[in-house]
Amino acid sequence: MSDLGDTTSGTTEQPAQTPGASTPTAPTPTNPAPTAATPSAPKPGAPKPGGPKPGAPKPRIDGGVAKPHPVSSHVSSVVPTIAPPSDPSKFGRVDDDGTAWVKTADGERQIGSWQAGDAAEGLAHFGRRYDDLSTEVALLEARLTAGSGDAKKTKAAALALLETLPTAAVIGDIAGLHDRLEIVVEHSEAAAAVAKQEKDIERAAHTSRKEELATEAEQIGSESTQWKNAGDRLREILDEWKTIRGVDRKVDDALWKRYSKARENFNRRRGAHFADLDRERGAAKTRKEELVEQARALSSSTDWGPTAAAFRDLLVDWKAAGRAPRDADDALWKDFKAAQDVFFAARNSAASERDAEFESNATAKEELLAKYGSMNPSSDLDGARAALRDLQEKWDALGKVPRDKMTELEGRLRALEKSVRDAVDAQWRRTDPEALARAAQFRERVAQFEEQAAKARAAGKDKDAKRALEQAQQWREWAEAAEGAVGEM
């Protein structure tokens, strides 16, 4: 293994199981006091005294301990590396009488007795037991390297195995197992520290997230009026809340109380809002029922103008009443609209009849204009005046015409009326004695001012003479204008 290795006898010790091997039943091993033996020489590749053990965590620059390398995230389970079966003959023996011995740093130690076969079979039996024990150690190594499981439990299991090694009834590299287990213990302590740090960081992150969710829920609970969206968001917060684990129980309870209180506050405000809305809709329903009755009462009216104005007022009141419950509101509007449609349909029908009548009147008036348009007041004033009176009587009797034709027809009538009126005025001016008298008076005034001018000039009063002549000229112009008007008659 890359981090947790063992170099006993120059070969990395790996857990192994012999496929198909069976373990014969052996009598319960006895543990007599070990006989004195010469300590075995250090194994090739064994750790030097005082030096770091193979696979121990390397110090980091920041003074911490490097975390054991976890396996890739795709590994679904912890699988120990399978090593070939060990050679028990290198680490112990079984005497011909069945006594089993294992070599240790302190000499040979008797581990039991084998009576189920010959010595070779006994040696193989105790070697397989060693291999089983090595597999347990390899499993702990693999679990620690993969970063799976609880590092504290891994350490406890390693310590328990360490306690059994001095009395273990196995033949194999017990010293190597001891070193491997010590490395597991050391790495477990580092892994536990790292796991605790990561757990603290994760707990802080989860706590912070729940605080954010609680704060958001409180804002929604106290401020939001988007009832549907806010309610959906509170449910989303709850769903996310349930997925966040590892928060301290007391802190989690306090945060949950904040969220729960915020949700209750929101539900209370939402309930009050919809209760008010129900009351408002009930009042709107009552008011709209009244408006429907008023509309029905107006639907049969033929007083088109005032009734149309009354319907406009009812529509304003309808909009101001607000919304009733949906089903009732739709039904009430249908009734209101039906009453309104009855009235306006009748008014439109009447308007159509009126328009037809107006068109007929316009045609008749055009015929009158064509008939009387040939009158000549200048040649026959009396006949023209009689024809105009006849035209006006018939015109008034016909009544109204369409609005778009009114200006044109009235203009043509006014033109005929003006031609007759101008002819009457011209005749009157030609026979007006007052106009002739005014012209003579103006001439007399001219003569008076000329006489005054002559007297003033004779007296040497040139300024008075000039002023009198100016006034005489003014009256002369007026006299000429009066005489000209009479002449034009």
Image (cartoon, rainbow, N blue to C red):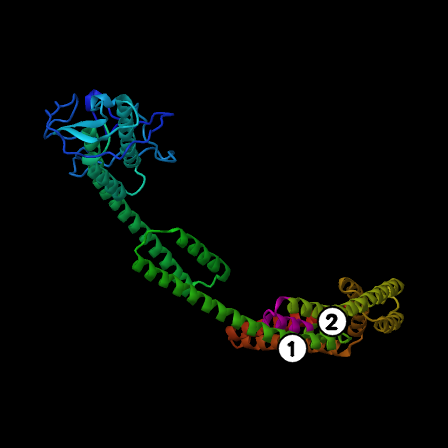
241 inside magenta stretch: no
- The overriding secondary structure of the stretch rendered in magenta is helix
The tag on residue 445 is 1
Within 10 Å of disc 1 (Cα), the crowding (few <14, some 14-19, many 20+) is some
Residue 172 in view (yes/no): no
- Position in image of residue 305 (x %, y %): 72, 73
Find numbered disc 2 in the image and state the secondary structure of the residue it sits on. helix
Q: Quadrant of residue 473?
A: bottom right
Q: Quadrant of residue 386?
A: bottom right
Q: Report the residue at 76% width, 71% height from top.
A: 343
- Position in image of residue 209 (x %, y %): 34, 52
- Quick check: 360 above or below 81? below
The tag on residue 339 is 2
Viewer-proximal residue among 417 and 328: 328
Give the residues drawn in magenta, as a range: 311-326
325 inside magenta stretch: yes
Q: Report the residue at 40% width, 51% height from top.
A: 243
